[in-house]
Amino acid sequence: MIPTVLLGTTAIPNGGGELRLTQRENDFAIQLVGVTGDLMTSRMHSSEDALAELGCAHLRGVDKAKVLVGGLGMGFTLAAALKATTSSTELVVAELVPGVIEWNKGPLGECAGRPLNDKRTTVHLGDVAELFRTQQPIYDAILLDVDNGPEAFTHDNNSALYSVDSLHMIRATLRPKGVLAVWSAWHDPSFTKKLKKAGFDVSYKTVRAHKGKGSKHTIYLAKL
């Protein structure tokens, strides 16, 4: 039997619990301690890729765009955003958990091709919500993969990020023709209503977790 190796544990700030990183052969997984199942694995990231591909589709060939990625995870969304944009694009990735950043700098980083090493990438250590308080039009695309989606799972504070008031703030940080893309583990019709109430034109796509198979996830696309 192939063993599963524990590579590390790290605390989620503000009493959010503890994460652990494991490896089994070439596959990595991140789990929330005390909860059955994986939060994310390196085997299944097609929907994370789709978040960036759909959210940055309007930026193909656009110079000097700025993209915000909320949630580093295993780096797949950031890596896909780098591929989907031009060499002059600036990408900011916000991650709340310092340990997750360190894991991506270590052996986990190979999974997504080490996107943190790209010269276009800047890391913001902290809550992504902090970056919306300026309410100034800064970003051409905002890609949010925080928690399990609009309904908080790992951290209660994340639910505030998807409130109508917060969505108004997020909208104010988008440049003209900007797009907010949100990853969710499931479709939540009430979230579509919140996005519309915040002034967005909303659509969504259902995507598979792994190359046409596996769980169905939802990507919300909210446009100005």
Image: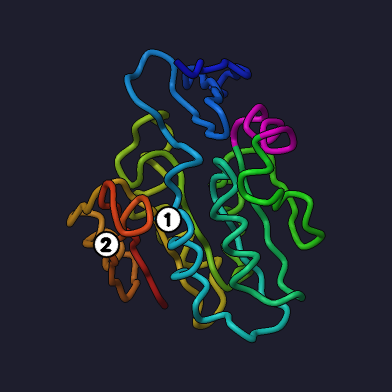
Residue 113: x %, y % from top left: 68, 51
Magenta segment, principal secondary structure?
A: helix
Q: Give yes or no for contact between labels 1 and 2 (Cβ–Cβ under 8 Å).
A: no
Give above or below for 10 relative to 101: above
Residue lying farthest right? 119
x 25%, y 55%: residue: 191
Q: Quadrant of residue 62?
A: bottom right
Q: How many residues crowd mark 2 within 10 Å: few (<14), some (14–19), many (20+)?
A: some
Q: Residue at x 37, y 68 (%)?
A: 221
Is residue 210 or residue 136 the one in the foreground? 210
Q: Read off the magenta span.
A: 96-107
Q: Which amino acid type is shown beneath numbered disc 1? A: Ser
Judge by depth and name the residue closer to the eye, 116 or 220.
Answer: 116
Secondary structure of the residue carrying numbered label 2: strand
Query: Residue under circle 1?
Result: 46
Whether residue 4 is situated above or below residue 57 in the rendered picture: above
Q: Of 33 and 190, which appears nearest the observer?
A: 33
Q: Above or below — where is 144 with respect to 4?
A: below
Distance Cα–Cα, label 1 vs label 2:
11 Å
Judge from the rendering whether residue 189 lies leftward or rightward of residue 39; answer left or right.
Answer: left
Residue marked by disc 2: 206
Question: On the rendered image, what quadrant is the N terminus found in?
Answer: top left
Q: Amino acid at mark 2?
A: Thr
Residue 195 screen position, x and y as percent? 31, 63
x 53%, y 34%: residue: 27
Kindly report which numbered mark, 1 or 2, lies closer to the viewer in this rendering. 1
> Which numbered marker is on residue 114?
none
**x and y, in percent, of residue 66 in the image:** 66, 69
